[in-house]
Image (tube, helix red, strand yellow):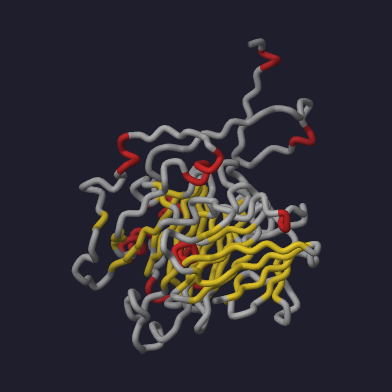
Amino acid sequence: MGARKTRIVFLEDGQDRREAENLRTGVVVSDREGRMPFRELFTAAWPEMRRVIVGFDQPGVAVVAVDSVKRRVAGTLCLAAKDDRANAATVGRHGQCDLYLHSDPALSLRHLAIVVHPIHAAVKGGDAPAGRMSGEIAFRVLDLRTRTAFKDEQGRRLEAVTAEGPVFLQVGGYALFFLVTGDEGLWPEDADQAWQCIPERVYLDEAPAEPDRWRRRRGIPIPVTPDAANPFAAGTGVHDTPPPPREAITLVRTQPGPARAQVELRLDDGELPLGTLRLTSGGMTQAMLLGAHAAQTGVLLGRYERCDTHGATVFAHHGISRVHLLIVEIEGRLYAMDTGSTNGTFETGGAAGPLRIVPLGNGSQLIFGDNLARMEWLPP
């Protein structure tokens, strides 16, 4: 091709297309391969990372995103663990996300959901909930049914993990450091000493991302590589059963995420419904049965084809975001989480402002945007 027809665009900080002569220039994004140099990035970003952790004196989780190219902090987020209810945040390229990461076009507008589990009695000196180590802050990271999901430290692509302690994940060109907050004395100023304070991450179970992700329902054939059938081969450090107790350890449980969009029903074979999501807009009503497995992995509501309500007439209004709401079960309780929608989600009879996450009870009603649609949760 001639020189005038070839153009190289560097996307480290994004480009303002309003200043371009050719507004139809296309961009092809390739997925970065190889393992993320987490320790190098941790060392480079530790001074600012430590300021964030120490400055947030509540028990919870600090999330620090480090740009792997520039080797500096690109954004931070702190989530407090609340008494007897979950707390949540969204990560992505949309301006309504709590952790806004704009530089990498490989990220979806709404890419990840982070849910900090309720404190309960675990960090108050009482008995921990089932499956939770006493005294630990637990949190879950869920991919919002994107094309690329996220990776762990070994480069394994995952859809959802639940961790009890520090853990490192890769999303696009960013390293995400999840560090538990609330104890300044745990984190020395020296980066090498701080790295030594981080416990070993031990991965439990085997739940990698499906090789074809949510695109299965669109009929797009995706080649399956030999490793895709079992990316957790021997020698990867993943255990089927919990290892012997250690003084300092982070247990990371890999789980399936909301990986298959399904409009009609969310029930596995022979499964009884937990209840019904009744969706109403413009005088029309549609219902979706919700099963236990779907509640555990998560159900997405919105206009986009990766959502379970894609094609639903009641969600056709453009004011409803393409990925608007996540329904997910946390420790036996069902929650609705706004995923950084443009026009917000509101609780009828609740707080006046938009919500981020709210537990669902019998008859709970949520409003999408300026009364564009409503959702009601109806247990059996």
Report the front residue among 19 and 374.
Answer: 374
Report the front residue among 263 and 154.
Answer: 263
Q: Residue at x 45, y 76 (%)?
A: 332
Left/right of residue 224 with respect to residue 58 in the rendered view: left
Report the front residue among 317 and 107.
Answer: 317
Report the front residue among 329 and 88.
Answer: 329
Residue 267 drawn above or below residue 120: above
Q: Where does the image place residue 200, in percent across and percent down from the top left?
A: 29, 61
Q: Residue at x 44, y 57 (%)?
A: 160
Left/right of residue 11 with respect to residue 266 in the rendered view: right
In this view, the residue farthest toward the left is 244
Image quadrant occupied by the N terminus: top right
Q: Where does the image place residue 216, in percent across and percent down from the top left?
A: 50, 42
- Quarter location, residue 218: top right
Q: Where does the image place residue 358, in percent across and percent down from the top left?
A: 60, 75
Residue 165: tell me if it is visible. Answer: no
In this view, the residue farthest toward the front is 270
Residue 147 drawn above or below residue 200: above
Q: Residue at x 80, y 64 (%)?
A: 283
